Image (tube, coloured by chain):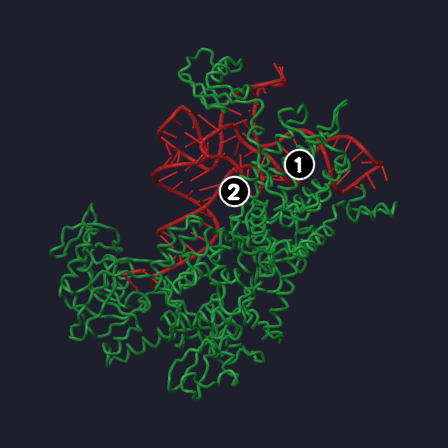
Amino acid sequence: MQRLGACAIYKRKSRGVERIGMTRFYDFKAFEAKWQRIWEEREAFRVMEDPAKPKYYCLEMYPYPSGKIHMGHVRNYSIGDVVARYFRMRGCNVLHPMGWDSFGLPAENAAIEHGVHPAAWTYDNIGYMRKQLKQMGLSYDWEREITSSDPDYYRWNQWFFLKMYEKGLAYKKPAFVNWCEVCQTVLANEQVEGGRCWRDESEVIQKELDQWFFKITAYAEELLEGLDRLPGWPERVKTMQRNWIGRSVGAEVNFPLASGLSPITIFTTRQDTLYGATFMVLAPEHPLVPQLAQGRPEVQIFIERMRTQDHLVRTAAETEKEGIFTGAYAVNPLTEEKIPIWLANFVLLEYGTGAIMAVPAHDQRDFEFAKKYDLPIQVVIQPEEGALTTEDLEKAYEDEGVMVNSGPFTGLPSLQGRETVVQYLEERGIGKRAVNYRLRDWGISRQRYWGTPIPIISCDRCGTVPVPYTDLPVLLPQDVEITMKGRSPLARVERFVNVSCPTCQGAARRETDTMDTFVDSSWYFLRFCNPEAQDRAVEKSKVAYWMPVDQYIGGIEHAVLHLLYARFFTKVIRDLGLIVHDEPFVNLLTQGMVCKETSRCPTHGYRFPQEVNAQGRCTECDRPVEVGRTEKMSKSRRNVVDPDDLLNRYGADTARLFSLFAAPPEKDLEWSDKGVEGAFRFLNRVYRLVDGWTEEFSHPVPAISFADLTVGRAVYQKAHLTIMKVTEDLDRDFHFNTAIAALMELVNVLGQFDLHDEPGGHGERRAVARFAVETLIILLGPFAPHLAEELWQRLGNPRSVFEEPWPMHDVEVVQREVLVVVVQVNGKLRSRISLPPHAGEEELRRAALHDSRVQTWLQGRQVKRVVVVPKKLVNIVTD
RNA sequence: GCCGGGGUGGCGGAAUGGCAGACGCAAGGGACUUAAAAUCCCUCGGGCCUUAGGCCCGUGCGGGUUCGAGUCCCGCCCUCGGCACCA
């Protein structure tokens, strides 16, 4: 019985030494290290294609190597590991890989702040985090590890880029970026705060630079429609993608100019309100503006002001509407009235045609604008009840109604009017049906060093020339000075920039921008199928075997960006003929955030737990600290828990078990130190239970069958019920928390069980106990793999517990021996009756009516009806 | 404003339209111990009936459907998240 943890040994050796707060615990450190070593030696999680087995691809979002793993990773990867181990035990050939999303800005910031090379910083972090993941006992096939910043990986980003370039899906156009004059660099949207640079607080301007784009809009319709064929995705993720794609159906209408210049086309979803269009508004950047506003310097000034205003600010809903008259007029094609053309901040060049017809009576934005600049308002839609007049209009009437003041259309319901008007426009060549998407093309240029070089060369004679495939990869040069000064750091590396043109051999320059790191993660799941392939990005047969991903698991924060880009890439690669599937991820589990309560001091803000004393006061100023609401764990909120501490103190199995037990996976998890201890206690209880019985189990146990069992029937049955419950919970929605609860129930039952036979017994109790314990260990395996392996081995089993097939419950055993049926009178619980398990409806009814407690409730009442739910309940309805 | 989650004990959370509160945490009581820790056992939604044992109320609020509603329907309130001048 000398198997308890180190502390217990210490206590025994040093009798008489008093230690307060000493705990006895199982030696998780030794077990976990041992089994991690054995798994590695046995290559337990290597997989190859095996047509004989059903395949299962389980994937968790690969991490950015920021330094250390955080609790979100612990949760994410614990979930994934249970899924992977479970399906493996169910007989599937499981692909469960891991890698590193290792290009990105933090590496460059580290270079600027600490003078470390981004590569050194990144690869150090990967080394540390890989060690942490291994310490968690995750069942990855590490032979398939990929690192997106390796040339072996990113060369294929370049390859895909060139393929897309050939197909016209990658193109260059001028686009606005956030530019800080002080830093001389482009800033990401997240680095612009209120229109100012986050570093030096100087004003950020919109600068027009040549940028590379992927034409994701070419797939807008398919990306939208495909969502309907993803039943395994959470509804909210699909909704967010639908909103993001933002399909709207309407019409494009041509408005002739009064001066006879070529007409201006607008997009509208409300062509039924065309008769109410009393003016037009163009985006300040609209290409026709210079012609229209000739000789009007004040318009130039307005445009200039709009150009320099931060795009985010300008497009914010709270920003006041402002505009200016261009001096030009257009003609409403239906009323044939002359209407003024204005420019305004709220009209965006990127959406629709960059021009709108303004219907102030029926569009709130137009209404506010018309009121401000005193422009005419004309009511053309009347609500069903009550008349609307222009005079008493306090806000725009945007709902449906009946068309009025609309010439031949007057009297039509607005909904129907939309169809009739668009037909009319098409017949006369004034306009046509049109669909618009809010989705914009994906700008992938980054003026950064630590990313995939864009494989393009520009030559003064030949223009834009793609790097030939044979010259890939375009390697990212190593010795580059990284500062915040200047444009892309690569632009100052002459050896890199200066090349000869692949077409004319003349002097030419390389593109010095790098790709958005979302490009890397848009296809990494394909690379896991054939990470070793040197001559191609994806190997058709292997990808055909493994893809699509059966279960993808990650944070909700990628609901739109990553998950949309990955779907887009999948469709592009399909159209390149390399894969056959349309969607990358069949089932998606978006795990909730890991949260913890925060502490705030009135003077010092967020406090770490160690910055709060026992009296709940700030250690710096002694003011009472307010315990705030629970929020997502983050360094800035000072409410993080370091997984290293958790792993050292309680071990991987406890860390995993707690993060799975505390909440269902898709909900937020509230951190609780006490809850972690609870999980640890449970594992210790399992350990002690098995440890205490190992000796008994070394004696031979007889074969048992439930039918002949004279003792321990309830325990035997509980084991089968637990198999049923755990299996159901894993199959239905991965309800790990209730599955673990079922295991706890089994342990509670076993804790009460005495396995010593009555005099004259022949080991039946021992046999029941052994069966139940082995069942427990197998079922516990996916959740607490190290402890399960250790206990399994100690019971004398030579093979790994993960080579055991997942058990199946016996339907005969699970049948209750005695049915306890609930009896209600008028829907209220009044009694319970016990009956043999196969009692029929009539027996139930009779037994219920004769029950003495029920009798007292029926006194003086007439039984009107008796509802019988077989095996469950009888409800007696009286008058 | 629009869309999507969610409101159940002191807390995290359970409940295919059929026993509300599984399991865990906290709390209280007890056993073991010289003592503490650890462990084990018991109690644990609220109110009421002196007891055995029972009764009443209770899943955000108000209606409805049903023999029966935490669960389904209608109307609200609160809360979290996403989107938001998208024509």
**Is disc 2 placed on a helix, strand or loop?**
helix
Residue A223, position as x, y percentages in the image: 37, 58
A777 left or right, relative to B12? right
Above or below A655: residue A749: above
Above or below A483: residue A520: above
Identify the residue at image location x=50%, y=20%.
A823
In front of the other: A530 or A753? A530
Above or below A405: residue A451: below
Determine which quarter of the picture holds residue A609.
Answer: bottom right
Residue A40, position as x, y percentages in the image: 67, 56
**Residue identifier under label 2:** A731
Work out whether residue A622 can be spotted.
Answer: no
B42 left or right, relative to A534? right
Query: What's the colour of chain A in the image?
Result: green
Q: What residue type is labelled 2?
A: Asp
**Is disc 1 placed on a helix, strand or loop?**
helix
Q: Residue A496 carries which label?
A: none
**Residue identifier under label 1:** A747
Query: What's the colour of chain B in the image?
Result: red
In front of the other: A543 or B6? A543
Identify the residue at image location x=28%, y=60%.
A435
Q: In which quarter of the image is the N terminus of chain A?
A: top right
Above or below A875: residue A543: below
Identify the residue at image location x=62%, y=34%.
A719
A619 left or right, relative to B57? right
Identify the residue at image location x=13%, y=63%.
A428
Residue B83, position as x, y percentages in the image: 40, 58
